[in-house]
Amino acid sequence: MALRKIRRVDHEEEVGLVDHLDELRSRLIVSASAFGVALALCFWRNDLVLEVMNQPLDGKQPITLSPAEAFTTTVTLSAYAALILTLPVLLYQLYAFIVPAFGKREKKVVAPMVALVPVLFVAGAVFAYFVVMPAALSFLLNFNADEFQTELRAREYYGFAAMTMASVGVLFQVPVGVLVLTRLAVVTPAQMRAKRRYVYLGCTVLAALLPGVDPVTMILEVVPLVLLFEGSVVLASLLGHAATEPEPEPA
């Protein structure tokens, strides 16, 4: 069955529940189709995906403990990679579905922020891959190395790597949250500066909840969070508040 063109709904337009559900179904189909294509591509070239993910191990090869584990682990890792590849499509579909709920002023604030989300997510994932993971693995694999024979199970390592990259990518959305709150005049940069000690505490708690229980990983996750927050506050101060003129009443 051919997929119909998705109809955009305006903020002022009133539509029924059936129309909203129909739009949601169409956007879910588009998202699932994009993910399916990316999954097929990543599984086809799973050798490259595995090579990239094994790079932080510095020559150490993960092991599998069951006949089917190599296959299931490869499929799972391909799904992680496909999710990252399709992130811009998924975010656009989500934005397009919820944007009618915003007024004109909110749209002017939200639209550029949405464009920043995939950029910051990729930046966070890259930071985790090149900085956090090598340092964390070096510390964890060499801790008490004389007392333990440490082996890496493939499924657990790739899950740890994927969760670390995804978590840091999500935490790199701090500038988006700060800019949205200030542009919508919910808080001011001065108020954020006054409460920075609580923000620092929150960053530390978030880093402690992320994968990786070692102090090296925690420090490497807290530092960029604090820097991102401070940079976002400075940027918010330069941009100022968004215009707060009342929207014209619909005729």
Image (cartoon, rainbow, N blue to C red):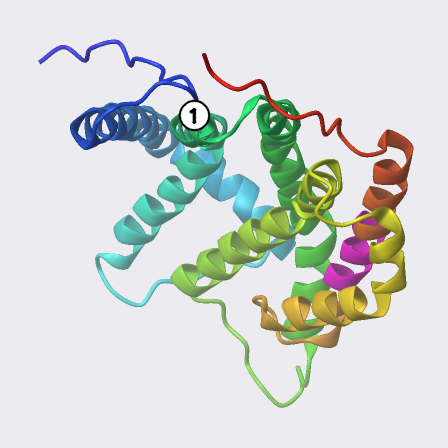
- From this view, report whether residue 241 is shown above or below residue 169: above
Residue at horizontal 47 percent and vertical 43 percent from the top: 50
Residue at horizontal 83 percent and vertical 38 percent from the top: 236
- From this view, report whether residue 162 is shown above or below residue 160: above
Give the x, y percent position of residue 38.
37, 27
Give the SS element for disc 1: helix
* Main SS category, magenta section: helix
Report which quarter residue 113 is drawn in.
Answer: top right
Q: Residues within 10 Å of mark 1 (few under 14, many from 20)?
A: some
**Magenta includes 222?**
yes
**Magenta includes 109?**
no
Report which quarter residue 82 is drawn in.
Answer: top left
Point out the stretch of residues depicted in magenta: 220-228
Q: Is residue 200 left or right of residue 206?
A: right
Of residue 241 and residue 172, the one placed in the foreground of this image is 241
Q: Is residue 174 left or right of residue 82?
A: right
Amino acid type at circle 1 is Pro
Of residue 200 and residue 126, the one placed in the foreground of this image is 200
Residue annotated with mark 1 = 100
Residue 133 visible to an observer of this rendering: yes
Of residue 31 and residue 212, the one placed in the foreground of this image is 31
Q: Quadrant of the C terminus?
A: top left
The residue most toward the left is 1
Q: Is residue 211 left or right of residue 85?
A: right
Give the x, y percent position of residue 69.
28, 58
